[in-house]
Amino acid sequence: MKHRRFQWICAGVGSLLLLLNLGCHADKTVTTVDALWPAYTFYEAIEEAETIVYGKVVDKGTTQIEEHVIGEDKTFKEYYRDVTIEVIEMLKGDEESATVNYIEMGGETSTQVIQYSGVVPVSAGDRVLLFLRENGSYICPDGLFTEDEEGMITVPQNMMPQTSEMALEAENRCTVAEYCEWIGSALA
């Protein structure tokens, strides 16, 4: 009897979670775009980036759609949002900038949710560290770090400086201040 009641409770909780998940995009088609991203080392990322900034997300625009022609009959659409970052610390780039804009791939229309593999969307209020290209996109998903409540970021091994004792781990947690100091040392 207890086993059957447990099964019904689990089924009910599972159904509720499914409904809550579907409720977010009930009438929309969710499309995941498999993107190929370049891999950079810590030093390559610093060199490739036009701007390296630590800041707070203050605005996230609506989804923009850009259509590209790739052949006589072929086109593809690129979905993105403009995100405004309030500069806390400019590590590389225009030191006079109070804000920096970057392009977050993906978005949502009235009928679709478009997600790009590897892209973690940010929200207003998030504190982030970004390695940006000249056009405002980040150099790769490894070029975006979101700070947690403890002031820590998780850094993949390839984005750790070789001089760091932590560079041996597959993923490393460090403070934003510590990572910014490593970037500053590499830029000096």
Image (cartoon, rainbow, N blue to C red):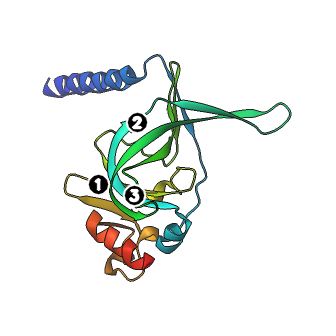
102 over 150 or under it: above or below: above
Specify the quadrant that holds the N terminus. top left
In the displayed image of the protein, which residue is found farthest to the front? Answer: 96
Tell me where residue 53 sits by quadrant: bottom left
Q: Give the amino acid type for the residue marked by disc 2 in the picture.
A: Lys
Q: Image check: 113 left or right of 154?
A: right
**CA neighbours of label 2 inside 10 A, class few (<14), some (14 to 19), many (20+):** some
Q: Is residue 95 visible?
A: yes
Residue linked to disc 2: 60
The residue nearer to you, when weighing 173 against 90, is 90
The residue nearer to you, when weighing 42 against 100, is 100
Residue linked to disc 1: 147
Where does residue 20 sit, x and y in percent of width and height? 32, 23
The residue nearer to you, when weighing 75 against 23, is 75
* First-in-chain label (1 vs 2): 2
Q: CA distance from mark 3 to mark 2?
A: 22 Å
